[in-house]
Image (cartoon, helix red, strand yellow):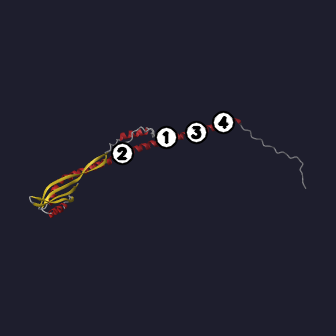
Amino acid sequence: MIRINLLPRAEKPRRALPTADVSRVPTILALVLLLEVVAMGGWWGYSQWKLSSLRGQATMLRAEETRLGGLLAERTQFERMKQDLERRLDIISRLERSQGVPVALMDGILRSVPQGVWLTALDVQPIVAKREEQAAAPAAPGVIERLEQAKERVDQPAQTPAAGRGQAAPKGKETRTVTEVTGYKVTLKGLAMSNFMVADLLDNLRKVASFKDVDLSVTERTEVEKVKVMNFTATWGIPL
């Protein structure tokens, strides 16, 4: 069975919508705009502080780079000065040893010549060696010069590759030829009554400590005043 309600329904009361206060809109917009301005000002101030801090760090790093570059240049110069001083001391030492060569040479020869051997010629030639070395570096700049260079590097902006095209290319390292006497070559000529006497002479020469690589370069039989003798030539070196 179906029931139908024919009674009228009671309508529910509708809620009233809140009315907006139009007078507060300009104040809200002004407040929002003020907050945005304050935020942008704070961000700009932070950016300027950060930029200033980075510039200060860049200046410190450039100054440190200049200082280290000066120390490196001084170290390179000191090393070259040390090498030059060692070379000079070595030359002086060689010269001191060279002064004793004539006496040691004649003493060694006189002690080595056996009976039946006559000396006819003695020739001593220096052994020269040449080598290339870098020229000495210019004097390192002082403290004032390094500070001025550091100031110029900080004040001058970094140049682009295009701006530096007109600059002259850096010069290569200069070298010089150094000639040194490393020893002497001795050539001894003479006459002997027999090959055995020549062999004795070579054995005696090889026993001298300052004589190196004693060798018999020439030996031939000849005749002097109708007497047959051996004409010989011995060579050796005297290192310094």
Front position among marks 1 and 4:
1
Residue 40: which numbered mark, if any? 3
Give me the C-alpha separation between circle 1 and circle 4.
37 Å
Front position among marks 3 and 2:
2
Asked if disc 1 and disc 4 are in contact, CB closer than 8 Å, the reply is: no
Query: Which residue is located at x 21 percent, y 54 percent?
Result: 185
Give me the C-alpha separation between circle 3 and circle 1.
18 Å
- Disc nearer the start of the sequence (3/1): 3
Query: Which residue is located at x 63 percent, y 38 percent?
Result: 32
Residue 27: which numbered mark, if any? 4
- Disc nearer the start of the sequence (3/2): 3
Instruction: Point out residue 3 in the picture as x, y percentages from the top left corner.
Output: 90, 53
Q: Which residue is mark 2?
A: 73
Amino acid of disc 2: Ala
Q: Secondary structure at mark 2?
A: helix
Q: Callout 4: few (<14), some (14-19), or many (20+) C-alpha neighbours within 10 Å?
A: few
Amino acid of disc 4: Thr
Amino acid of disc 1: Ser
Of 197 and 22, nearer the camera is 197
Give me the C-alpha separation between circle 3 and circle 2.
49 Å
Reply above or below: 130 against 23: below
Asked if disc 3 and disc 1 are in contact, CB closer than 8 Å, the reply is: no
**Quadrant placement of the N terminus:** bottom right
Residue 52: which numbered mark, if any? 1
Q: Is residue 9 left or right of residue 89?
A: right
Q: Secondary structure at mark 1?
A: helix
- Disc nearer the start of the sequence (1/4): 4
Q: Callout 3: few (<14), some (14-19), or many (20+) C-alpha neighbours within 10 Å?
A: few
Q: Secondary structure at mark 4?
A: helix
Q: Callout 1: few (<14), some (14-19), or many (20+) C-alpha neighbours within 10 Å?
A: few
